[in-house]
Image: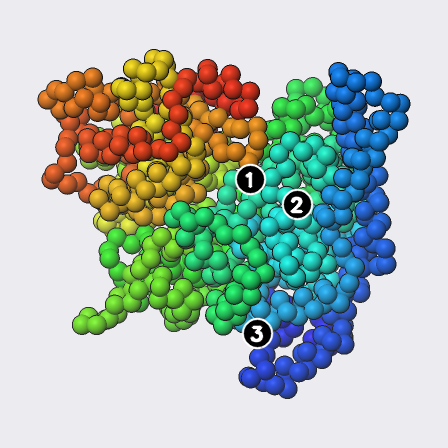
Amino acid sequence: MGPEEGDIDVDLLGRKQAQKDEELQTNNLVVEFKRFREDPLEFLKTLARHVQSSSWRAYDNYVGQDLYYPGFSDEMHEKTMASPTIRNCISRLAERAIEHEKKWSNPSPSRRQEIEANLTSIADKMVDDMICLFQRKGVLKFMYYSVAQMFSRTYHQGVHVNSEEIDMLRDKARELEGKNQSLIFMPCHKSHIDYIAIQVICFRFGLSLPVVVAGDNLNFAVIGPMLRQAGAMYIRRSFGDDQLYHSVVQGYIETLLKGGYNFECFVEGTRSRTGKLLPPKFGILKYILDALLSGEVEDTWIVPVSTQYDKVVEGESYATELLGKEKQKESFQDFINASKILSLRMGRVDVRFFKPWSLKGYVINQLNIESSKSLVTNLTPTTVTGDQKTRLLRSMGYRILSDINKASVVMPTSLIGTVLLTSTGRGITMKTLVTKVRWLIRKIHQADGRVGTVSMKSEECLVFKDIEAMVANGLKVLGSDLVGKEEKGLIEPIYYAKDAFKLSYYRNQVIHLFVSEAIVTVAMYTLIRRSNGNPKISKAELLQEVGFLSSLLSGEFVYASEGLYENFVQTLETLHRQGIVYPSKEDDDIVIVELSSTELGMGYEMFDFYCYLIWPFMDGFWLSCVALFMLVPDLKDRETSADNATVWVEEKEFLNKAQALGKTLYHQGHITYYESVNKELLKTALQQFQEEGIVVRQQSKDRKKPARVSLGHDWMMERSTADDGFFVKNDIIPTGKLYDFSELISESRHKTLRHHDMAVTPKGSDMNLLRQCSTLGRQFKTRLVQTIDDAKRNDAFIVISKPHKRDPQAYPTTKL
């Protein structure tokens, strides 16, 4: 076998390996398919090899279960329809229908069979629309060649994989093939390209293709059927209370995993528009766990996958969606129009695989950790209670996210975006930019992170000229619309964040490496600010503040699993080693933490860097909290309704108004970071406030109808009943738990501008802001005033009202 056919020495695009990373054992797959205009002969040779299906291109000797054989789809259809899950559901629904009919008629003896036959026909159609096909290998080969061409043009520096990880996957696949056990790929979701990236890698390196869960919004003309031939299974975006559809999805997944077929789903459920990982969605995870617990599946293996891009093709649409524009439905016309991306040069793609782990082993281990009885050694349908399953799903989801973060690499564009958005000045020179990027690479290595284009952790690899070349290339990929360059009339060119909102996407891909340090430093900043600049902080007070911030931001970040105190201690040790803080003891044995003289002498360089990472999130949570002032009933509401009546509005309209408020506050100088007004951040904050019991949610049983939100009773604010020295009638009075909670969040924000024309109360509250919220609150088109008890009595809705966990002054001891 020549080097072209080797598993390691050929890149995904069919070219020879250009560079090998000695430390990480990666193939730097940077050489692309030749374009016809560049090298017609080489282009035709490559095309001929694919047409002739030479070597691995035939996709005949892959590792794993057989896919492309006559009758495969029919066989999977029959096995799925024979699934006990579907049969039991049909029987249960038929019995329920008979019981209902008995209330007004006397069903005939054959009526049950008629109902079951009808339900079976419906389920059969559902299965037919859902399952992947794997019928025509020629379609797969054509798609591989086409996708490789797309990658070579759009991501001109290639698709990079780690050769040791590929060998690890192939070895594990060989082991599982004889056991009829599956590899379940769990990638992060950055782009629609994620759907085909894993398929391309499996095709190229001879692994059985996974069946990929995809939303039916992607099943549009031409492309949808082709994706089914390459492994896509299409499911509805929402199932609602359709029990039969639930059983069909469960039955198909059980059939796949029982047969040992590889599987793929996105643990986040949807594409991340912000660059960082989203909280896990548990729908498909629940089906996988239920398949294991049912006894139908012996075991299955989870493979967390990190897919990183120098630049995502959807970057522009992500920004517009986050700023409030409605998401457009995908179509073939959009796909054709997107062909312009082929002329772009968007850098590279890096795909990394975490070591596979046994789901059965994980579940048994988790059950034994919390069990005080005899150790669990096997799983049965009765082994796990409902509460245990909920905890298992949550721990599984966050374990997968944590492993994705561990497997990920930081791209050059993320390095540049992070440096520009954490610098204190308006802009920096190229020399300073390169110096700071090199400094950031060292910090990433110290945090056990990896950089996609830097292989070694030794100082020899961080040569200034090499880093400068990497930065120059990254600037080209980002483009002049994200990073500005000012040079007219200047001594030397200055680079600056021209579009901080879009650039924040790339900074957010670095935060997971430093989130603990960032939370602790912002907590220190808050306490120093609260004490009017006193640099000495009680360790106990610092722990309380860290607990508050970690709980507040728990929906945004994935924390280490050791728990709050242990992570806090480890983080302080890290900051001490870095020369940022040092602990000491006072005469009364109180442990004090303060900034080191070294850090002070360096102008708070590291301290500010960490704070800048999460200050935009603090702005976003403060904005969400302040927006809740819009839900305070006015005096007229209280005159015409019950004393405990609250204002209810549709969640979508509330978020739109909150975003409009945020944009206004940004331009007024009350908010420092424009990226804090993005809709995903506001949604996360609102969800967190619901968990705290601050917000009450009214969800329609019909999932197509919008949800409503309101304030909990304990968090209501008062209004002025008459004019006095500081307030006019109907003003929101800046007192109460909600106001105090907003002030706690505000203390952790970056200092904002103060205007000389602010109407300030004796407490320092900005009455202009409170009056803005009051005015916006009366403009809600979906505004409804009723008590929470009345809302609960509406049978068409489910009211989620959680008792508040804590007083806003009390700090939790949750995981950091």
Mark 2 → mark 3, Cα distance in angstroms: 37 Å
- Three-letter residue code for mark 1: Pro
When the figure is inspected, residue 183 is found, relative to residue 346, above or below; the finding is above
Q: Quadrant of residue 145?
A: bottom right
Q: Which residue is mark 3?
A: 31
The single residue placed furthest to the right in the displayed view is: 109
- Under circle 1, the secondary element is loop
- Where in the figure is residue 270, as x and y percent of width and height? 55, 46
Q: Which residue is mark 1?
A: 280
Front residue (pair 231, 509): 231
CB-based contact (under 8 Å), mark 1 and mark 2: no
Classify 270 as above or below 805: below
- Compare marks 1 and 3 and give the one earlier in the sequence: 3
In the image, residue 250 lies at what x, y percent?
72, 38
Residue at left 55%, top 84%? 38
Residue under circle 2? 235
> In the displayed structure, does residue 280 sit left or right of residue 420?
right
**Closer mark to the observer between disc 1 and disc 3:** 1
Mark 3 residue type: Val
> Which is more toward the observer, 559 or 346?
346
Do the CB atoms of the residues marked 2 and 3 lie less than 8 Å apart?
Answer: no
| Image-based side of 635 in relation to 128, left or right | left
Direction front: furthest residue: 105
Real-space CA distance between mark 1 and mark 3, rounded to the nearest whole angstrom: 35 Å
Disc 1 to disc 2, how far (Cα)? 18 Å
Q: Quadrant of residue 119?
A: top right
Amino acid type at image mark 2: Ile
- Residue 322 on image: x %, y %: 41, 48
The quarter of the image holding the C terminus is top left
